[in-house]
Amino acid sequence: MSDTENCSICLGEVKVKGGGVPLFTPGCCGKWLHQKCVEEYVKTAVDTKCPSCRENFHPPSWMLTNPSLVAPKRIFALPLVASQRPLAPPPPRRKSWNPLRFIGAIVGSTGARTLENEDVLPETIDRTSTDSNSAIEHIQSSINIVATPEYSCVGINAIPSFHVRVSLNYDDSPITQMDVKSKSSSDVPEISKKTISSKTALDIVCILDNSGSMQGTKMDSLKAAMRFVVSTLGPNDRLSVVSFNSSATCMHHLLRMTDENKAKSNNLVSSALQAAGGTNIYAGMVKGMEVLRSRLSTNQASCVFLLTDGQDRDNLERKISLVKELKRNGTAVFVFGFGVDHDAEHMMAIAEAAEGTFSYIDTDDTVIDAFGGSIGAMQGSAPLTEIALTLRTASLLGEKEALPADQVVINSVEAGHYPVSMAPDLQTATVRFANMYCGEKRTVLLQLVLPAVTSPVYTHLISSSVQYSVLNTVCQHPSSSTDSGCSCEVERAQQGDERLVNPVRALLVEEELRRVEVTTAIKAAKAAADGGDLSAARAILVDTQTAVIASPAYAVRSKTAKALLQDVSEVIDCVRSHDAYDSMGGKNTFCQTLSSNTQQRSAYTKAGKINMYQSPSSNMAQETAFYSKSSGF
């Protein structure tokens, strides 16, 4: 499409980009028209034919109800797919006004069911599969915080840099495990019924790219992945499928995954999801958002899958605004870049804005693995939301051996992508996470300044607590200040004590220091590679690779150190040439590696790589999905 066209109504010039005049397209022919001309046309025309191609089309509802209204700020310039039926009557009046109804009117869809066709959850459904109070108690018992000092014993002199690793764990593995019932090539593995019955009921919206570039094995693999997702869902779960190319279509709204509706969803995706047209990611996101925001009933957890193989950099700020809204509402977001040609940087930005996962699918047949790992991440107990991890120096606790309040300070907090707020006195820091899936953990690295003490003493340096929401209930851990397991203790010894000679750093702290080092190096190398300086990128990464190999963590072959070495070695290979970085998926690999390390989360681990962040249920579901391919799932 050129940047200028002619309006079919007034025949005047239409500037598609940079014109500053509100525009509208009916979507049937792709022609752009002046919005003011369309308003006048709707007011005076004797039919509802497109003025360009004469196909039927639906004007937005705000035009129909108030033709003289001009509201350019509410127009998103998204195409409206043509309808082949007469103009529909206005929808029934709703209890509350929802602005996304108007967005949906602009996006539109051919033959899409209306929101009144949502499968409303009966009040009799127990949406958490267990009594709410007992479920919350079980989740509370699965939360723990572990603080690890860099050294167990240090001198009594002032120490300007002392590290503490704090780990927040949501460990519910007995419930979230998925059972691979068969690993033979003749049987399709299944997820155990016990797992399905014990997990929190889920609302999931899959927003899928069906543009022309998805034809062939990509589309076949995507359909197989959707069949796998459907197979994991129980009768209390609900699924909606949205497709997008040049415009967006809601293939079906939220349906409870009974056997009948599973067959209906599979048949619809198999027959109607066809590759054609361009790529309008924002249209798909708006349509998916409309499904979620217009729900008449809700399950206790919800998530969105967003997959594309194309490049569509338009409306990035609007896309980010939508996923931030999802994040605020507690909806998990899983973003998938399919193939080497997608815009990984763009999709990573969307994922990070939602604090979701970004998965790079480098081969067609691994999309089912990535979908399996992602749906597995939502299995088990309900996700935690609105998480605030608070870290306080011990001098605020009023303990006898606490250090003076004006001397013990938190110098820095390394938490990757997550926001950190620090009190002016540098004695309290809070790290916030939008959500945590069952089986995940988050670690932060504190750098403290320790003052001198006059005599040997055991000192409690840090107290940690966390507040979070789960099942619409605000919870706190620990429940009281006397609870154990959330403080960090270090012994101060006189100079000359033999324990101060060649001290051994705690392995967990050593691993965290290396993780931060690797993440920082990959970010710097990516910046150099984006600027065209592959030599500088390689030099940064090779130095980091050498440091990891020489580290005490790698000397004992710790899992974390080996995984970090794999990450560094993989991205070194990605900058071997400009073609490797720009055209063969190198940049995509950088983006996925950087995203998983800065957010400490992943829902998909490539074959042959060590799983560092994936939860047990996610890893097991990915394995189940992998074995399903051998049976032609």
Image (tube, rainbow, N blue to C red):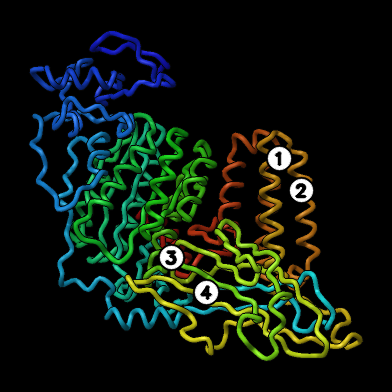
**Total numbered badges shown on the rendered structure:** 4
- Where does residue 366 sit, x and y in percent of width and height? 47, 51
Callout 2 amino acid = Ile
Q: Which amino acid, mark 3? A: Glu
Task: Give whichever of discs 4 and 1 has the lower sequence position.
Answer: 4
Could you tell me which residue is drawn at 28 percent across and 52 percent down?
A: 292
Judging by the rendered image, the residue that carries numbered circle 1 is 528
For the residue pair 469 and 441, the one nearer the viewer reads as 469
- Residue at disc 2, secondary structure: helix
Q: Position of residue 334 (x, y in %)?
A: 43, 53
Upstream in sequence: badge 3 or badge 1: 3
Q: From this viewpoint, is residue 184 visible?
A: no
The residue labelled by disc 3 is 386
Residue at mark 4 to residue at mark 3: CA–CA distance: 15 Å
Residue under label 2:
540
Q: Taking 414 as reference, is 29 above or below it? A: above
Contact (Cβ within 8 Å) of mark 2 with mark 1? yes
Q: Quadrant of the N terminus?
A: top left
Give me the residue at 38% from left, 51% from top.
Answer: 325
Residue 596 quadrant: bottom right
Residue 380 rendering spot, x and y as whole percentages: 38, 72
Q: Alpha carbon of mark 4 to alpha carbon of mark 1: how far?
A: 35 Å
Q: Earlier in the sequence, mark 2 or mark 3?
A: 3
Q: Residues within 10 Å of mark 2 (few under 14, many from 20)?
A: many
